[in-house]
């Protein structure tokens, strides 16, 4: 069971599917300068048996944290093909099953091997790599007039209401594969990365604002209605496991437009973000100038007659 | 103000004199009680208790019993040798207001603890109490759970809140007849989901037009919440769920009153509530509007009332219209 069984299964599968020569080409897709002789210790004038080569290479990729990339390539070569030919690995089902035991899973949405987290949804969607740049859509969300509410109401009521609000936001964004990267009581930063992530971010935000009357009526313990504002900006960021360390222009821009250029119960997006929005939804935005900056604002409710 | 401190000491206590030295005798009177000689029959009225613990296992039952003797729950401070967080938590959970370690205890710490404990005990409110207070001012709407519509008998009169929805596709021949049927059918499913969410049910649906009925729980507020959810989410329903290329038009109205319920044959529903609602929807309500009758408005939760403004009169009764956060 576990990693050693997974390694054994992969070694078996590979040794039946490839010759050593084919396997070398396969591995060079991951590391072009990989020296099989150096890795296995075989003299240069000998042929390396495929089983030995596979075993050493898998150990090597495991030690160098590239086992996910390797497994990913194997599964893709079976499902899509490798260099124009589908590879037949007889025990692929056993490999996939054992991967799950080890905490890995092939995501059909992403077409990638991802890490499964039994505790909950991972901030890196199970596959983002440290220090690599990715495209994200950042949603900055905030409760308007938080300071006044905190001064006016008992701490317990505030805590309880804000906790409900966080749960409410989580429900709305997680069904669209969004993740909360940071949360500071009265709001936070939500990130979308998968699929059509800009539209997903926008639809989640629309749903959050649209359902606020119901949230206020059912889950808000304060006398005042909670009013929120949302700023959206799509852009690039360098991923870091320690989310707090991620510093990006795009994140700052999302926070900035939410804080300074958004009215209560509206969504503001930047020009760059607007270009990535579905044309039907794009029609609903109006160009406004708030605090000397042009943003595109979505006001509610969005009705057919107004588009 | 009763400023007597009841100090419950262990039988072989070594801190009696030490504690007496720390306490401000001008401000507080002191009543020392040996833990082995407590009279549980006597009702106690003092509001501060200092309790010397031996260990949680041996002392917690005694502590609980002592607290029960007090007319009003006192500020109770545990004095202990055990420097472990889990022990503090255990004592707090059974009602202690503060926990002091014998080592390093000073006059300042003790007096701060006593004053803090009194304030904590006297001002403490349970969350349930707080919720109750808030509910009195601006109550939250509680959605009904475990609803069984089969408990309603056919042809009996019941209090009902009825929501009528009409969806209109602009007739520019953009859609084929089967597409239109499909669209209406999908709307029916989405509307059914919304009704279920708020404890209602889809009573009947015919092409582009149907009614939801609410009977259980806070029927007026639940029906209004379902209508608001439909109203605010209509855009998303069209674009995201039905994948349409345009946002359609709709009308939605709510009325409340007494009606004859018929679970199976909706044609048998005879009620003035529905009659008036149909006229209100068809004759008075404009596209993309949510209107409610006077009956509904009167019973609305104050929080929801804020979303409605008076629109005018229909059949000599006031009609109110929904407005999203006063825009």
Image (spheres, helix red, strand yellow):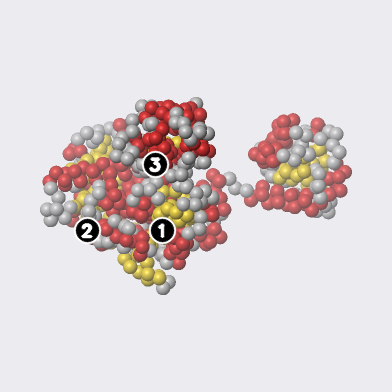
Question: In terms of depth relative to the viewer, which is nearer, B170 or B323?
Answer: B170
Name the residue carrying label 1: A235
Label 1's element?
strand
Residue A256, placed above or below residue A203: below
Q: CA distance from mark 2 to mark 1?
A: 42 Å
Viewer-side label of 2, 1: 1
Residue that protrudes farthest toward the bottom in the picture = A292
Label 3's element?
strand
Question: In terms of depth relative to the viewer, which is nearer, A113 or B55?
Answer: A113
Viewer-side label of 3, 1: 3
Residues marked 2 and 3 touching at CB (< 8 Å): no
Mark 1 or mark 3, which is nearer the start of the sequence?
3
Residue A99, placed above or below residue A263: above
Name the residue carrying label 2: B286
Q: CA distance from mark 2 to mark 3?
A: 50 Å
Parent chain of label 3:
A
Mark number displayed over residue A112: 3
Residues marked 2 and 1 touching at CB (< 8 Å): no
Parent chain of label 1:
A
Viewer-side label of 2, 3: 3
Q: CA distance from mark 3 to mark 1?
A: 22 Å
Residue A74 position within the rendered picture, expressed as x and y whole percent measured from the top left: 39, 36
Label 3 Cα neighbours within 10 Å, binned few <14 / some 14-19 / many ≥20 = some
Residue A61 position within the rendered picture, expressed as x and y whole percent measured from the top left: 49, 38
Going 51% across and 38% down the picture, which residue do you hit? A38
């Amino acid at each position: 069971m576990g990693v050693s069984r997974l390694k054994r299964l992969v070694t078996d599968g590979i040794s039946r599917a490839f010759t050593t020569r084919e396997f070398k080409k396969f591995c060079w897709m991951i590391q072009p300068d990989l020296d099989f002789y150096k890795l296995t210790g075989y003299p240069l004038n000998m042929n390396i048996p495929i089983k030995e080569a596979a075993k050493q290479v898998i150990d090597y990729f495991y030690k160098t944290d590239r086992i996910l990339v390797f497994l990913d390539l194997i599964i893709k070569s079976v499902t899509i093909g490798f260099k124009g030919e589908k590879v037949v690995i007889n025990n692929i089902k056993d490999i996939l099953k054992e991967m799950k035991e080890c905490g890995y899973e092939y995501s059909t949405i992403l077409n990638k091997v991802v890490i499964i987290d039994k505790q909950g949804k991972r901030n890196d969607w199970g596959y983002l790599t440290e220090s690599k740049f990715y495209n994200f859509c950042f949603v900055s969300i905030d409760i308007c007039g938080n300071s006044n509410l905190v001064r006016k109401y008992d701490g317990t009521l505030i805590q309880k209401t804000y906790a409900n609000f966080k749960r409410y936001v989580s429900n709305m964004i997680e069904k669209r594969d969004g993740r909360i990267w940071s949360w500071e009581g009265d709001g936070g930063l939500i990130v979308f990365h998968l699929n059509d992530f800009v539209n997903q971010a926008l639809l989640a935000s629309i749903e959050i604002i649209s359902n606020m009357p119901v949230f206020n009526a059912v889950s808000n313990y304060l006398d005042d209605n909670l009013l929120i504002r949302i700023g959206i900006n799509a852009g690039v960021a360098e991923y870091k496991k320690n989310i707090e360390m991620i510093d990006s222009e795009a994140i700052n821009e999302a926070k900035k437009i939410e804080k300074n250029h958004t009215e209560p119960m509206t969504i503001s997006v930047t020009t760059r973000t607007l270009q990535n929005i579905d044309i039907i939804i794009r029609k609903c935005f109006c160009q406004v100038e708030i605090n000397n900056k042009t943003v595109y604002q979505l006001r509610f409710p969005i009705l057919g007659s107004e588009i | 103000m009763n400023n007597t401190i009841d100090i419950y000491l262990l039988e072989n206590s070594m801190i009696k004199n030490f504690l007496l030295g720390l306490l401000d005798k001008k401000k507080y009177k002191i009543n020392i009680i040996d833990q082995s000689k407590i009279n549980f029959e006597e009702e106690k009225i003092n509001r501060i208790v200092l309790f010397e613990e031996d260990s949680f296992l041996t002392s917690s039952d005694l502590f609980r019993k002592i607290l029960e003797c007090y007319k009003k729950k006192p500020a109770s401070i545990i004095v202990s040798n055990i420097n472990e967080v889990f022990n503090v938590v255990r004592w707090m959970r059974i009602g202690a207001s503060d926990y002091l370690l014998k080592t390093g205890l000073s006059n300042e710490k003790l007096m701060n603890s006593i004053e803090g404990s009194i304030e904590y005990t006297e001002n403490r409110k349970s969350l349930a109490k707080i919720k109750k207070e808030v509910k009195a001012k601006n109550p939250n709407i509680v959605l009904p759970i475990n609803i069984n519509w089969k408990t309603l008998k056919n042809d009996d009169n019941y209090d009902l809140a009825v929501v009528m929805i009409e969806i209109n596709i602009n007739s520019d021949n953009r859609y084929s007849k089967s597409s239109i049927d499909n669209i209406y059918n999908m709307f029916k499913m989405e509307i059914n989901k919304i009704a279920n969410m708020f404890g209602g049910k889809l009573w009947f649906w015919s092409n582009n037009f149907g009614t939801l009925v609410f009977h259980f729980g806070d029927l007026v507020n639940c029906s209004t919440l379902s209508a608001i959810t439909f109203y605010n989410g209509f855009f998303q329903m069209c674009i995201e769920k039905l994948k349409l290329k345009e946002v359609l038009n709709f009308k939605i109205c709510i009325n409340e009153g007494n009606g004859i319920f018929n679970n199976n044959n909706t044609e048998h529903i005879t009620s003035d509530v529905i009659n008036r609602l149909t006229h209100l929807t068809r004759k008075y309500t404009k596209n993309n509007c949510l209107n409610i009758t006077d009956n509904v408005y009167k019973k609305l939760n104050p929080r929801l009332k804020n979303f409605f403004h008076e629109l005018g009169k229909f059949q000599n009764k006031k009609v109110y219209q929904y407005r999203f956060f006063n825009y």
